[in-house]
Amino acid sequence: MLNLQPDYLVKGSILKLSIQTLLSDGIRGLILDLDNTIMKPKAALFEADILEWLAEAKRAGLKMIIVTNNKNEKYLSSFDKALAELDLPMIIKAKKPRRTKLNEALKILDLPAEQVCVIGDRVLTDVWGGNRIKCKTAFVRPLLGKEEILLFRFLRKIEKLFLHPSHWD
């Protein structure tokens, strides 16, 4: 049976996800989706408020890694300097919800799955993938930049069917 329910259903972007709540719940590591979760798509830069949230999470002692399905190596390498400054490793071409790269991320974090939260804006990739490896999961609203292609708009409508309607108020 598919487990598509997140442990944390955030009514807003990642900025509305309480780091204190995560810590109180025993979370010690984060697997972060990239596009639409911590970076607007095709932006190639982190906005200041996102950088501050990531820095706050790091100061709180959370280990973090980005796991993205994005395959565009040229684009992804364009913000390597920002990742290095944050000491934030990244795994690309993850093919979430497949478990392989998510399990690789757990090994890099060196934490048991029950102490890690997968955070993302997609139910069928991030939440499902995180649930498949027995991590906690957080579903956040996407950071939208340019208008999404029709396929992603369609998929988001389908994904809404799996979540409590109050999330979309």
Image: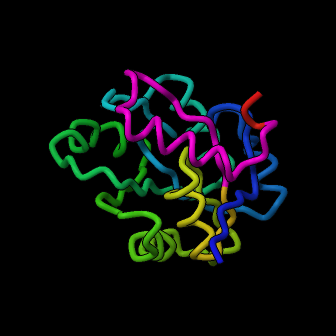
Q: Quadrant of residue 140?
A: top right
Q: Residue at x 44, y 53 (%)?
A: 66
Q: Residue at x 82, y 60 (%)?
A: 25
Q: Is residue 135 left or right of residue 48?
A: right
Q: Quadrant of residue 18?
A: top right
Q: Is residue 140 above or below residue 30?
A: above
Relative image position of residue 83 (x, y in whole percent):
36, 43
Relative image position of residue 32 (x, y in whole percent):
51, 52
Q: Residue furthest left?
A: 74
Whether residue 151 is in magenta: the answer is: yes
Say which of 80 and 9 sits in front: 9
Q: Is residue 51 above or below residue 103?
A: above
Q: How many marks?
A: 0
Relative image position of residue 5 (x, y in whole percent):
71, 60
Relative image position of residue 54 (x, y in whole percent):
56, 40
Whether residue 56 is in magenta: the answer is: no
Q: Is residue 24 left or right of residue 8?
A: right
Q: Which residues are magenta?
A: 138-166
Q: Residue at x 49, y 58 (%)?
A: 125
